[in-house]
Amino acid sequence: MKKEYKIIGLMSGTSLDGLDMVYAIFTPKADGGWRYRIDKTHSVDYSPQMREKLKGSFYQTGEGLTVLDAEYGRFLGEKVKEFVQMYNLDVDFVASHGHTVFHRPDLGYNLQIGSGAHLHAISGQKVVCDFRTLDVAFGGQGAPLVPIGDKLLFSEYDYCLNIGGFANVSFDNAEGKRIAYDLCPANYVLNRLMRTRGEQFDRDGLVARSGKVNKELFDALNALEYYHREPPKSLAQEWVDKNVMPLVDSCTDTFENVIATLTEHSAYQISRHFRPGSKVLVTGGGAYNVYMLERALSYSDFTFVKPEKNIIDFKEALIFAFLGLRRVLGRPNCLASVTGASHDVVSGVCYGFDIAE
């Protein structure tokens, strides 16, 4: 085993706010664990054209989706190449999340685009990608993927909460097994509505704070079957389009009140999952939504811990770098206790590696 691994992690979430890149250095510890250091970070905002292409990928033809897969892979490759040149980075490989188009583990399939072959060819770097498909093939949800990183890199917290396009949580149960699942849609729906008013997101939750909760919409959202189902479980765009947006679209209340209600709904669903007195690490874009966090704390007795900005913004990219490391070392990176697969899985497709590696 090497003394250290230098990895670029790429993350693009359902909120479609852009591409996060982290250059992380992992060093093995004597006890078998890992130390990490985030050395460099960079975020790339999507152009309106790229955002619309990714947003519309779900509705593409087969050929159109294949074209976009290659185009997005080339885009990722160019951005990695620029990142490497910007800081003169020495890189072992790149680990890429890709962009989720289809996520139907109930039907046995999932699709992430951002062709690893094109990413490898354009960047000149070795690549690990497609972390979900094998877990789904073994009967798992293929999500969430970050819990093994939460368990091995952030074990000092009772819970790890990430509020991105969807909010998800991970924690160890009484038997020490990692449990994780999606809690609710968060920024995916809020940002989608804010963009209709020319804003990318509700900064600090100010729009939500200015509105009032619509009790009928709030109760209808909380009554959705997903919230009463036991894990393993996960959410995706398809579920939102089928279950959430019809309720939102049929609500005739003011824009501010709808945003307030969706924020309250997220806060309520988030708050339900923490033991009293627990310490909760909160990351992702939603960690900056002051109002949402205030409302979550109003429902239960726990403490949010906000880490340094690099962790808030780049924790998922960091953990994808870690998932890639475990794939290259042949160690499980998808936990059956999280996804419901038949066994722990070493997941990820590699490009540019020699057979002997």
Image (cartoon, rainbow, N blue to C red):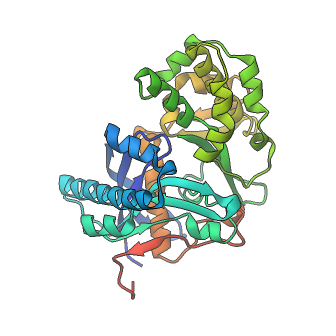
- Judge by depth and name the residue closer to the eye, 46 or 329: 46
- Residue 162 located left or right of residue 116: right
Task: Name which residue lies at 53% across and 24% down.
Answer: 290
Quadrant containing the N terminus in the rendered view:
bottom left
- Judge by depth and name the residue closer to the eye, 159 or 277: 159
- Judge by depth and name the residue closer to the eye, 294 or 227: 227
- Judge by depth and name the residue closer to the eye, 296 or 119: 119
- Residue 164 located left or right of residue 10: right
Q: Where's residue 225, x and y in %? A: 79, 41
Q: Where's residue 160, x and y in %? A: 60, 46
Instruction: State which quadrant residue 210 falls in.
Output: top right
Can you name the residue that lies furthest to the bottom here?
356
Up/down of 83 relative to 341, above or below: above
- Residue 94 located left or right of residue 225: left
Q: Where's residue 213, x and y in %? A: 68, 16
* Residue 214 visible somewhere in the drawing: yes
Task: Name which residue lies at 65% across and 44% down.
Answer: 239
Up/down of 219 relative to 93, above or below: above
* Residue 18 visible somewhere in the drawing: no
- Residue 181 located left or right of residue 59: right
Quadrant containing the C terminus in the rendered view:
bottom left
Task: Name which residue lies at 25% across and 54% down.
Answer: 83
Q: Where's residue 15, x and y in %? A: 48, 40
Task: Name which residue lies at 27% across and 69% down.
Answer: 121
Q: How many marks?
A: 0
Up/down of 143 relative to 300, above or below: below
